[in-house]
Image: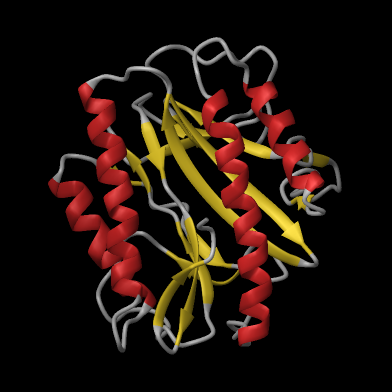
Amino acid sequence: MPIIIKTPDQIARLREAGRIVAETYEVLRPLIKPGVTTAELDRAAEAYIRGKGALPMYKGYGAARDRAGRLARPPFPATICVAINEVVCHGIPSARQVLQEGDLIGIDIGARYHGWIGDSCVTFPVGQIDATSRRLLDVTRHCLELGIEAAGKPGAHIGDIGAAILPYAEGEGFSVVRDLGGHGVGRELWEEPFVPHYGAKGDGPRIEPGMVFTIEPMINAGARETKTSREDGWTISTADGSRSAQFESSLAITENGVEILTAL
């Protein structure tokens, strides 16, 4: 599929959707504390998104069938994806999943507003966290910043993003998940281009004004390999049980540089 170049008016609509996502994090932030269930966070996020006239993007998304036509993976049942500790992404909120002191929780939010999509992820500490977890958060956040900086340089290519992220993360003693990555965003949640968080400078499509995509490095404290839950077909965790963190922004490439669409 070709990369869809967005007009300034379309980018303005994506900005509106992105702002709703950013505001939803501000609703959730004071709720993230020990004793709160991820189902409570999910209900608060859905109420805010719908109250703004938007739709939860993930709810009901992504059913998959096998070759015989049988349902191999049910549609995603919630508004937010949650990733606690060793979960990398796509975890399902639950009334039985209670936040504990020292946890890390990644919250991925997607919203559709007037047909356009905002998509972002933030990893939060729950109460006081240990030094290794704090460093994991700091390094992951900086990986996102490095990726955004690389995307905004004149003449940049998609491969430049991963070329900036990977050596920094590995130099800090962490690993970069390679079987997942960023993606184009527009009227659909996943559009071209695919944005790996590893790669070589100069590889991939050239980054042009009007492109809109996410950068969302998933950084593991241990090895980079992941596994997918056979029980729900959605939850992706580190294969070795180590902790993982993720930060994601949707961004637009403009004539004046990079604009973060999922910011307040």
User: Is residue 90 in view?
Assistant: no
Q: In the drawing, does residue 46 fall left or right of residue 70? A: left
Q: Is residue 178 above or below residue 210?
A: above
Name the residue nearer the viewer: 165 or 47: 47
Name the outermost residue toward the right: 69
User: Is residue 97 in view?
Assistant: yes
> Where the N terminus falls, by quadrant?
bottom right
Q: In the drawing, does residue 223 fall left or right of residue 228? A: left
In the rendering, at what x and y percent does residue 164 appear?
24, 64
Numbered disc total:
0
Residue at 23% from the left image edge and 40% from the top image edge: 174
Residue at 39% from the left image edge and 52% from the top image edge: 217
Q: In the drawing, does residue 94 fall left or right of residue 89? A: right
Name the residue nearer the viewer: 126 or 132: 126
Q: Which colour style is shown?
A: secondary structure
In the rendering, at what x and y percent does residue 135 appear?
22, 34
Name the residue nearer the viewer: 65 or 209: 209
Q: In the drawing, does residue 87 fall left or right of residue 202? A: right
In the rendering, at what x and y percent does residue 12 appear?
64, 76
Q: Is residue 104 above or below residue 148?
A: above
Quarter residue 4 falls in: bottom right
Residue at 50% from the left image edge and 18% from the top image edge: 33
Quarter residue 238 falls in: top left
Q: Is residue 51 above or below residue 34?
A: below
In the rendering, at what x and y percent does residue 118 appear?
63, 59
